[in-house]
Image (tube, grey):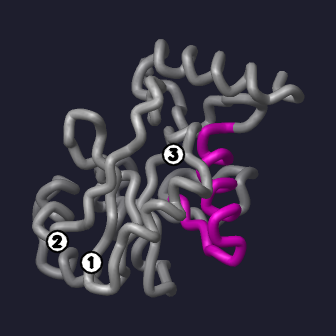
């Protein structure tokens, strides 16, 4: 995305970060939203930073998880403008009492580590002696429930300007009050 502030990019009148936070709150209205990144005016959340800022997903997970008080949490990227409460409900329902978590897999069978619902104690235990930098290295050995993301022909996350243009076209067409 050429160094753009991806979480701050707008889609259908809201930033991608606001859309993710809205999906979380629609799924669990009393959820505490923790954002690892620079503070913003919106969405309302607890903002924390990894040390050093920009160090990667594992240090970011450590920083955010330190503030989680619930027995379960969602680990989500901020570039998921199509994320809905129904996605989070699907992941939550897929996870059994013994599963450490549930994570979406894409059409190619690759885990999407930043779209998952996890047991807090399982991830804390895995992090306690993990020294690597890879979410796959950290979360893969936990063997989470794998949930296939429905292939509706649309990108779920936004990694390129073309992805952003497509999702904007789709969601802004479906949102009558979007700018």
Vertical order, 55 against 96 (above or below): above
**Which residue is at the front of the view, 174 or 40?**
174
Q: In this view, does 154 lie to the left or right of 9?
A: left
Read off the magenta span: 15-35
Q: Quadrant of residue 151?
A: top left
Mark on residue 142? 2
Mark on residue 148? none
Q: Residue at label 3?
A: 78
The residues bearing labels 3 and 2 have C-alpha atoms spaced at a distance of: 23 Å
Look at the numbered disc 1 and give the secondary structure of its residue: loop
Name the residue: 60% across, 50% down.
Answer: 84
Quadrant, the C terminus:
top right
Look at the numbered disc 3 and give the secondary structure of its residue: loop
Q: In this view, does 162 lie to the left or right of 58?
A: right
x and y, in percent, of residue 73 in the image: 46, 73
Mark on residue 99? 1
**Which residue is at the front of the view, 98 or 30?**
98
The residues bearing labels 1 and 3 have C-alpha atoms spaced at a distance of: 25 Å
Name the residue at the right extreme: 177
x and y, in percent, of residue 63 in the image: 39, 69
Query: Magenta includes 158?
Result: no
Q: In which quarter of the image is residue 174?
A: top right
Name the residue: 42% across, 20% down.
Answer: 160
């Amino acid at each position: 995305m050429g160094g753009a502030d991806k979480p701050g990019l707008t889609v259908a009148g809201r930033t991608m970060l606001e859309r993710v936070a809205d999906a979380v709150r629609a799924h669990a209205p009393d959820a505490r939203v923790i954002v690892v990144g620079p503070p913003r005016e919106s969405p309302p959340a607890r903002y924390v930073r990894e040390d050093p800022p920009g160090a990667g997903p594992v240090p970011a997970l450590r920083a955010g998880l330190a503030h989680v008080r619930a027995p379960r949490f969602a680990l989500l990227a901020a570039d998921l403008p199509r994320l809905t409460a129904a996605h989070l409900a699907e992941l939550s329902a897929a996870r059994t009492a013994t599963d450490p978590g549930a994570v979406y897999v894409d059409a190619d069978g690759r885990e999407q580590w930043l779209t998952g619902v996890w047991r807090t104690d399982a991830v804390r235990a895995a992090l306690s002696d993990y020294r690597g930098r890879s979410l796959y290295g950290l979360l893969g050995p936990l063997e989470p429930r794998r949930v296939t993301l429905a292939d509706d022909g649309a990108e779920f996350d936004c990694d390129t300007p073309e992805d952003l243009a497509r999702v904007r076209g789709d969601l802004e067409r479906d949102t009558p009050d979007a700018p």
